[in-house]
Image: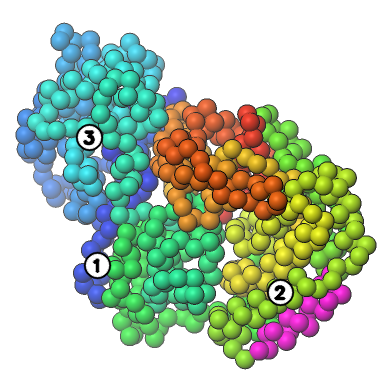
Amino acid sequence: MKNQNNTRPTGRSRFKNRSAIVFSMAAAAATLVAGPADAQLARKPSYYQQQNQPQPEGPAAQLVPRPAVPSSLPALRSQADFDQLARVYDAGTPMQLAHVLFVVDRQAKPPRMYYIDTPRYQLHVRFLRDTRLAPNTVKREIDRNYLVPDRRFLFGTLSWQQNIGSFTYEFWEGDKLTAPLLRQAEQQVRSSFFGPVKFKTNSTLHERVAKEAGIDFVSQEALIREQPFLPMNLGTATGRVRIVEDDAGIDALLPDDIAVLRQVPIGLPPVAAVLTERPSTALSHVNLLAKGWGIPNAYVRDAAAVLKEHAGQWVALKVASSGYQVRRLTPEEIAALPPRAVRTAATGAVPGSARAIRPDLRESRLLLLASLRARNSAQCGVKAANLGAMQAAHIPGTSVPDGFCIPFAHYDRFMRANGLADRIARMQQQPGFASDPKVRQKALAQLRDEIVQWPVDAATAAGWRAAWQSQLGGGGVFVRSSSNSEDLPGFSGAGLYTTVPNVKTGDALEVAVKKVWASVFNPEAWEARAAAGFGAESVLMGVFVQTAIDSANAGVMITRDPFDAGHPHITYISAKRGIGIRVVEGRRVAEQVMYSSWSKAIQVLSRSAEDTALQLDKDGGVKEVPVEAGRNVLTDDLVVRLSNVGAAVKRTFNGVDQDIEWATVGDRIVLLQARPYVERRR
C-alpha cells in the first residue's frame, strides 16, 4: 500500500477533475487560448498513484522568482495568507484551482494546525520529515494516518471551488475518517481560517461520517451538477458545425459534421465530433460509439447557443481535459483539407482495417448456451460466445440467463432464399443513395419492412419454437443480436442493432428473429459499418434467444476508469432501477459511481432521480412502473461485489478491459453481456 500524500487537490470530483470551465466563445474566428502546456489535470489524488507536478528547475526556476515563504502557518487569517501558501493548478485559465495542504497534529497539546507551503512540499510526508515534525516516520506509520482512528495526524487539503464560489476542505477518498476525527478537523479548520468553509466529501464513507457527525457538507455530485463542461473522449477534429434540434437532424448528419446535439440520441451516424447540451453517462451508446470511432466528444452547457455563430462553418475543434477550443478555418485551410474517404455504391464501405468475423456457415444446429465458448463466435457472434464463456467460468455469485443461438447459417439461408443480394444491388442503384442520407434512410427502412414480411422456411421456424419450448419452457425471452460485426476489439457496434424484449409467443418469436435480422440495415448500423470499413455483403446476423428476467436494478460497468486510462484499478458503474434498457440509451442520467480496488473508496458521480422504471409486462414487452424516488440504486456492498465480478470477467477474457451489462435478481448478479472496451483517440 503506497503512501497517499499527493498534493493534487481533491476539491473536484472525478468528473470535475477531468473538466474545466468552458472557454469563452466571444470571438467567432478567434483561436481560444488554452491552458499552459504543462498544466496538469486536477484529478483526485490517488493512494496508489503519486502524480506529482514537478516545479521548474535550473534556469526555468529563475523566470518567476518566489518570495520567501514560511514552511507553514498556524492559521490563514486573510486571502493574502491563503495566496502566499497556495499551489495553483492551471493558472491563468478558467479552470484555475488554488489549494493549500494542511496537517493537524492531534498529539500536540492543544492540537496544532499547520497550513503548508504547498508549492514547496508536494507531499504531506515531505513536510513532516523536512520540518522534523516526524523526521523518522516509516511508511507503516504514515499509512496509519489514513486508516485508523488513533492516528497522530490528519492530512487534508483546503481549496477554492470557483464553480460554487466557496472554500472547501477535504481528505483523500480512501481516508477512513470517523465522526470524532471529522469533528476535530472541522473545529481546527473553522477556528484557523478567515472565511466560511465547507467539508467536501470524497467517498460514500465520508458522506456517512459527515451525517453522523452532524456536519454540513458539499458532495461530489453537487459539484458535478454545477460543471459546464465534461470531456467524454479527448481529441481533435475538423468539420462543419451542425446544430441538431431533433431526430430528423440526426438522420441528415454527414461524416464531415461536428454535431451539436440538443438531446442525447439513442443512435448516431458517423460524424467528425460530438458536443451535447445534456450530460449523459460514459456508457451511453453515443459515447461508446464516439470512443470506438476515436472522435472528440464532450458535454458543453448551452452548446447550441455558444456555437450558434459557427453553425455551417468549417472549424477546428479540440477537446482536452482542461476545456475545449474552437477555431474558424481559413479558406486556405479548408481548400487544403484532405478528401474524405467516399463510400462505394457497391458495398457501402470505405477502405479500412476493420474486419468482421469470418463466418462458419457449416453449422446450422441451434447451439445451447451451455455449449458456447469463444470458438463459437464464428457460428454465433461474439455476444453469444462470450455469454457461454462467462457461464462456463462459474464466477461466484453470478449467473447467465439460459438461452440458445440461431447461427449465421440460418440468416444466410433465409437471405439467399429471398434474394437479398439482388435487393441490395437495386437499392444502391437508386439515385441519391450514395450521396443523400435521407434517401439511404428511406431505402433502408423499406428493405427492413420487406425482410420482416419475407417467409421463413417452415421447418426452420418450427425448430426455433421447439427449442424455445424445450430449453426455455416457453416463457418470455429477449431476442438479441449477435452479429459478426459487433463486440469486436476495434469495433463495439454498441446500440446499432435491435433487441426485441420479452417475446412470449411462438408467432412473436418468428417475427422478432426477422426484426433482429433486418436490423443489419438500421441506418446507424449501415453508416457505422461504412465508416469502419465493413461491406454490407460481409455482415451476417446471429440471434441469441435468452430467458427474460425482471431485475430490481440493472446497468453497465467498465473495468477501468473511462475518463483516464491511467487508473487501471478503477471500476466505473452506471445503473438504474428495473430493466437496464435506459442505462445505455443516454437520454436520462443514470446513477454513476467509481470504485477503487486500492483505496477501497466509492465515489458517487451522480444519483438517479428517476421515479419510474421498466419492468416486464405480463402480456409481452415492457412497461413503465412508478418507483420510490430518492432511493439509491447502488449500495456500497453491491458496488464492491460488482467490482469483484468485473475483475473476474476481465480475467475470463485474458485481462482485456470489458464493457459489461449486468442486472440484479435477489442477491444474485446476472451477467447479460461482455465485450471489449473500445477507445480510440484522434
Disc 2 marks a residue whose amino acid type is Asp
Horizontal and vertical percent for residue 57?
Answer: 22, 43
Q: Does residue 522 appear left or right of residue 629 in this picture?
A: right
Mark before the other along the chain sequence, 2 or 1: 1
Disc 3 marks a residue whose amino acid type is Thr
Horizontal and vertical percent for residue 536?
Answer: 70, 74
Mark before the other along the chain sequence, 1 or 3: 1
Q: Residue at x 16, y 16 (%)?
A: 112
Quarter of the image holding residue 303? bottom left
Q: Residue at x 28, y 38 (%)?
A: 11
Residue 511, disc: none
Q: Which residue is mark 2?
A: 449
Q: Is 217 located above or below residue 383 in the figure? A: above
Q: Does residue 508 appear left or right of residue 314 in this picture?
A: right
As for residue 423 lying within the magenta part, the answer is yes
Q: Nearer the viewer, residue 211 or 355?
A: 211
- Circle 3 or circle 2, nearest the eye: 2
Q: Which residue is mark 1?
A: 25
Q: Which residue is mark 3?
A: 168
Q: Which residues are magenta?
A: 414-430
Contact, CB < 8 Å: mark 3 with mark 2?
Answer: no
Task: Indicate the secondary structure of the residue bearing disc 2.
Answer: helix
Alpha carbons under labels 2 and 1: distance apart? 46 Å
